Image (tube, grey):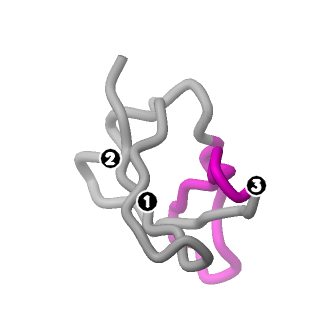
Amino acid sequence: MPTIKFYSVKSRKTVEIDVSNVKKVTLKNGRPAAEAVDPDTGTKMFKILSAADAALLK
C-alpha cells in the first residue's frame, strides 16, 4: 500500500502513514488536507495535500 509522509510535532520526526489510515478533509479556506493519528504518541497530524498526495487518496 502507498504511504503519505506526515511530520509529528510532538515526537519531532517524520512518520509514514498508510493511505488506508488517512482521512481526507477540507480546511476552512477550501484547501484539501489529510488527517492522521501518530501511532507512537496518539496525536492528530495534518498535512496540506499536494497534487500527487491527493491522487493517492482518491
Q: Position of residue 35 (x, y in %)?
A: 63, 55
C-alpha separation, residue under disc 2 versus residue under disc 3: 22 Å
Are the residues tagged 1 and 2 within 8 Å (C-beta)? no
C-alpha separation, residue under disc 1 versus residue under disc 3: 13 Å
Disc 1 or 3, which lies upstream in sequence? 1
Secondary element type, mark 2 = helix
Secondary element type, mark 1 = strand
Q: Which residue is mark 2?
A: 53
Q: Position of residue 20 (x, y in %)?
A: 56, 24
In which image quadrant can residue 42 be found? bottom right
Where does the N terminus fall, quadrant-wise? top left
Q: Answer few, some or many: residues within 10 Å of disc 1's Cα (few below 14, many 20 plus, some between 14 and 19).
A: many
Residue ID at (40%, 45%)? 16
| Magenta stretch, residue numbers | 23-41
Disc 1 or 2, which lies upstream in sequence? 1
Instruction: Say which of 43 and 35 sits in front.
Output: 43
- Depth-wise, is mark 2 or mark 3 nearer the camera? 3
Q: Which residue is mark 3?
A: 42
Residue ID at (32%, 26%)? 2
Which amino acid type is shown beneath numbered disc 3?
Gly
Which amino acid type is shown beneath numbered disc 2?
Asp
Which amino acid type is shown beneath numbered disc 1?
Phe
Q: Answer few, some or many: residues within 10 Å of disc 2's Cα (few below 14, many 20 plus, some between 14 and 19).
A: some
